[in-house]
Image (tube, rainbow, N blue to C red):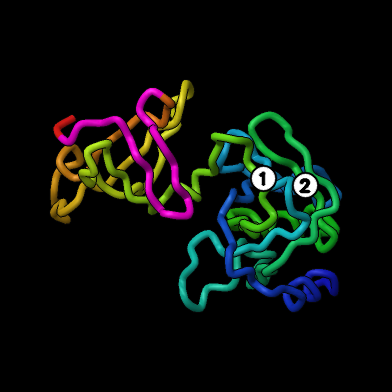
Amino acid sequence: MNKALNAALQDATWPDDAIEVGRIVDAWGIKGGIKVLPFSSDPQALFSSRRWFLKPPEDTPGRSVVKPAGPGKAAPLPTLLKITDCREQGDVVVAMAQDVPDRNTAETLKGARVFVSRQSFPTAETDEYYWIDLIGLDVVNREGIALGQVSDLLDTGAHSVLRLKRPGAAPDAKPDEAERLIPFVSAFIDKVDLAGRTITVDWGEDY
């Protein structure tokens, strides 16, 4: 292991508010660049921090390596990358890190999950919200009827759609019985109360 990568393994305190924002999909160039596939069409979270935290492709107990570095060898996965340059290139983000000096080292990071501190995210504009802040919120309609809890969001291209887990849905229920989809557009969204952990919508219980 090179000295820079060994230092990166030691020089990291995992943030309590870490959010997964992308995955390393390949090396880029010959000088240690990496390609990251962002989870958002607007990868500002990746640009907002120069400290990227990494986890293996599958965060399983005892698994601390990614791609083999050579015959019989495995490369330790650094917990932290200190980013020196970062930019969009097509559908991916390409970045250079202080602790990744060459392509061979970059290739050992392929598949790693990239996290940044939520605190480092740029401030959202008025009436704009990060998906991560909406997940887990309770959704009620104008009559105060609970419609479910946000489990995920879908991107249709034209707009986002709230994916709700219906109250009391059985674990083995069919998707149309266990879930409710509500377009996240002003025509249906009355209020998003992040502090109160609720979203009020103009939506019928039987929709």
> Where does the N terminus fall, quadrant-wise?
bottom right
- Element under label 1? loop
Residue receiving disc 1: 123
Q: CA distance from mark 2 to mark 1?
A: 23 Å
**Residue at position x 26%, y 47% from top?**
148
Is label 2 in contact with label 1 (beta carbons under 8 Å)?
no
> Where does the C terminus fall, quadrant-wise?
top left
Mark 2 or mark 1, whichever is nearer to me:
1
- Element under label 2? strand
Residue 182: quadrant of the picture: top left
Is residue 123 left or right of 151 when viewed as pictured? Answer: right
**Residue at position x 35%, y 49% from top?**
151
Residue 41: quadrant of the picture: top right
Q: Please identify the residue farthest to the front as the structure is shown.
A: 143
Q: Position of residue 90 (x, y in %)?
A: 68, 29
Q: Position of residue 149 (x, y in %)?
A: 31, 49
Camera-side residue of 111 and 10: 10
Q: Is residue 80 above or below residue 88?
A: below
Report the amino acid beneath label 2: Ala
Circle number at residue 95: 2
**Residue at position x 38%, y 49% from top?**
198
* Magenta-drawn segment: 187-205
Report the amino acid beneath label 1: Thr
Q: Position of residue 56 (x, y in %)?
A: 56, 64
State which tag comes first along the sequence, 2 or 1: 2
Is residue 51 left or right of 61 when viewed as pictured? Answer: right
Camera-side residue of 44 and 141: 141
